[in-house]
Image (cartoon, helix red, strand yellow):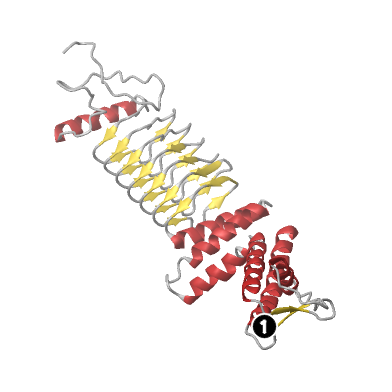
């Protein structure tokens, strides 16, 4: 094997990255980047990691940690780089102190990830991370914030009593199971966009916390959006076939979006007006007032639409009237009641949004 041969590990996350370590005999990868390590290789790997830490060498790009990675109580005085690293065992950063930027870009945590009581002096980047097991950020202190972009939490994750600074960004994040934010301190929620929460109880709590933070900041429009998502998450916790769940879906959500979608009342009203206009036109038994039409007059669709509008708005001019002996009069009565209700609902929801 040529003496100048180097580890062949490559990554697109770091421009022109080249590992300077020699590969293991007969292999293309060094002890740090080799995936399946023997017991002897694992021991050698741990010894070399300890030596790197003593030399304040925090370059772990693409490293494959097969056993427990113990960085607990470690003080990273320089920028640590865990880009595209893989932790097969527990990744223990308990009470770790990051004095500079911390890069966890494209990192894969196959087992438990523990960042409890860790301190981030600057903004860490958790871009494109995959957390397969339990993840803990309890009591963590993100002094300036944190970047969580395009990451996936496939198991439970906890931010209980953590401090999230003013540049904390959660964007394009997926939480498959429960996410706990008990008594977390959100100094300023810069961005919470396109967050997917597949655990409805957690989603309800999550959106409630974010809603309250937005209200404190005076961003009532976005607070209203999170209130809407909070109500949907709460509804989805009800039994799938329960009456309350479907009545909320059809009435509270369908008609006004829990007070956050006033245009839905208009959309529903227009559908009723045009739908019943078509019904009146096809069924008939809507007659003109003899005082206005001295000669026989055939009911046209435009006549039906006019009658439907004045009925829906409860104007009732009296120039058209239903046949008192036909069932169509009950439809007319129902339209008047529904119209009054939807107009009042639109006014209330629209005024509620405008007053904010």
Q: Position of residue 297 (x, y in %)?
A: 75, 74
Q: Position of residue 100 (x, y in %)?
A: 48, 31
Q: Find disc 1 in the rendering and name its residue.
A: 329
Q: Residue at x 74, y 63 (%)?
A: 351
Reply above or below: 286 against 212.
Answer: below
Question: Observer-nearest residue: 92 or 72?
Answer: 92
Report crowding for label 1: few under 14, some 14 to 19, many 20 or more residues within 10 A (C-alpha): some
Q: Image quadrant of residue 250?
A: bottom right
Using residue 354 as the reference point, say whether residue 243 is left or right of it: left
Q: Quadrant of the N terminus?
A: top left
Reply above or below: 13 against 322.
Answer: above
Q: Position of residue 263 (x, y in %)?
A: 66, 60
Q: Residue at x 59, y 60 (%)?
A: 227
Using residue 78 as the reference point, say whether residue 22 is left or right of it: left
Q: Image quadrant of residue 226?
A: bottom right
Secondary structure found at label 1: helix
Reply above or below: 38 against 137.
Answer: above
């Amino acid at each position: 094997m040529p003496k100048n041969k180097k580890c062949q590990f490559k990554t697109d996350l770091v421009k022109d990255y080249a590992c300077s370590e020699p590969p293991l005999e007969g292999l293309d990868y060094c002890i740090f980047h080799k995936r399946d390590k023997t017991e002897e290789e694992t021991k050698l790997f741990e010894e070399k990691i300890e030596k790197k830490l003593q030399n304040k060498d925090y370059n772990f790009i693409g490293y494959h940690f097969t056993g427990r990675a113990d960085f607990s109580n470690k003080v990273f005085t320089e920028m640590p780089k865990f880009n595209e690293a893989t932790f097969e065992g527990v990744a223990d950063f308990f009470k770790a102190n990051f004095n500079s930027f911390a890069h966890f870009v494209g990192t894969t945590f196959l087992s438990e990830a523990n960042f409890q009581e860790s301190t981030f002096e600057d903004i860490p980047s958790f871009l494109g991370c995959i957390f397969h097991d339990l993840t803990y950020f309890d009591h963590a202190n993100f002094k300036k914030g944190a970047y969580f972009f395009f990451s996936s939490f496939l198991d439970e994750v906890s931010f209980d009593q953590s401090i999230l600074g003013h540049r904390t960004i959660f964007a394009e994040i997926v939480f498959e199971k429960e996410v706990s934010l008990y008594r977390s301190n959100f100094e300023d929620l810069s961005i919470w966009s396109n967050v997917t929460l597949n655990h409805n109880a957690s989603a309800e709590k999550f959106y409630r916390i974010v809603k309250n933070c937005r209200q404190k900041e005076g961003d009532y429009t976005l607070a209203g959006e999170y209130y809407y998502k909070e109500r949907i998450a709460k509804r989805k916790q009800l039994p799938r076939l329960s009456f309350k769940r479907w009545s909320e879906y059809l009435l509270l959500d369908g008609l006004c979006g829990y007070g956050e979608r006033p245009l839905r009342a208009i959309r529903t009203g227009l559908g009723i007006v045009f739908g019943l206009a078509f019904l009146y036109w096809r069924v008939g038994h809507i007659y003109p007032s003899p005082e206005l039409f001295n000669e026989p007059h055939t009911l046209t669709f435009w006549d039906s639409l006019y009658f439907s509008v004045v009925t829906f708005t409860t104007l009732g001019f009296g120039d058209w009237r239903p046949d008192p002996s036909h069932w169509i009069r009950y439809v007319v009565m129902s339209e008047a009641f529904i119209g009054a209700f939807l107009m009042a609902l639109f006014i209330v929801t629209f005024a509620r949004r405008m007053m904010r």
